[in-house]
Amino acid sequence: MPKHAFLENDGVLAFAHRGDQDAGPENTLAAFEGAVHQGFGYLETDVHCTRDGQVLAFHDDRLDRVTDQRGVIAQMDYAAVQAARVGGREPIPRLDDLLEAFPEVRFNIDPKSDTVVEPLVALLRSANAQARVCIGSFSGRRLSRVRTMLPGVCTSMGPLETTRARVGSLGLPVGRFKAVCAQVPVWWNGIKVIDARCIRSMNRQGLQTHVWTVIEPAEMNRLLDLGVDGLMTDRPRLLKAVLIERGQWHQAVCSGSGSCTLRHTIIPAKNSTRMDRIPILGSPVVTVTQPMRNGPKMAAALPTTL
């Protein structure tokens, strides 16, 4: 079913949403390195652009919520942003540093502003990283620009595409999609976005379904039973434990140099092991290769990424 190299995987795509926040604050090198240590080959992050064109892995448009500094990133030069520490201790990473630090890991990237699109595309071209990223956004306009500027890159559905896909699951003709996957929540504003019928409809069209942001084991199991292709979580260690218990964990194999291949090794389930007692097994030691541096009503309601 995969239509893009980004999606090629032996089983369920397990995404560490903003990294492993047990290892470090969200969207920091420590968090991402922690997720890779756990064997995750897929990382989710967000990007903003500084006034002088540096693409940063950061969710908010302002520094205020998670750092010890204040200010709007788009109105600041990178030199000023460098002083900020996430959680009071971790620097804000540049996307190019992350791509270089984890050369075999795949990144799901949400461009959070219009101004970041062009620098992001230029960076991905320069890093030759098109095959190992997927771009998702709440903004259909941003997705359209990315698809035009970077033909062939993996993209998830925008809001209108998501609505069309949901309508299509009811048996109505909706045409073809430019996206290769849908990345959605189960519910949004009281509307159920994902159910078994929708997943089957996606699969018939060769499209994958990734669900965010799932943090409870019962919901993880329910969605996996429905047949989703990927899960994004703020609790990667818990998702790993769930997948181990089900016999569906695929460990990214990392070398001592920090290079992680996406040939995955299944860790068999242990039926006699309680999930809350499953150790985090087989975690490779990773050395970072570079030091840090229902129709119209639904159209306005359905989200597509986070």
Image (cartoon, helix red, strand yellow):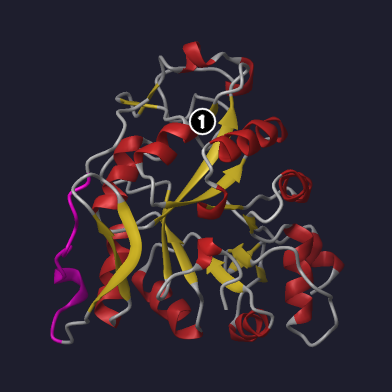
| Camera-nearest residue between 48 and 87 | 48
- Please check the rendered image and state whether residue 26 is part of the magenta-colored stretch, yes or no: no
| Camera-nearest residue between 272 and 189 | 272
> With respect to residue 277, does 258 lie above or below?
above
The residue positioned 83% from the left and 71% from the top of the image is 295
Residue 77, quarter of picture = top right
Which secondary structure lies at badge 1? strand
- Please check the rendered image and state whether residue 274 is part of the magenta-colored stretch, yes or no: yes
Per the image, the residue denoted by label 1 is 56
* Magenta residue span: 272-286
Query: What is the x, y in percent for residue 24?
Result: 29, 39
Residue 109 in view here:
yes
The residue positioned 38% from the left and 45% from the top of the image is 103
Residue 1, quarter of picture = bottom right
| Camera-nearest residue between 64 and 15 | 15
Callout 1 crowding tier (Cα within 10 Å): few <14, some 14–19, many ≥20: many
- Magenta span main SS: loop
> With respect to residue 156, does 224 lie above or below?
below
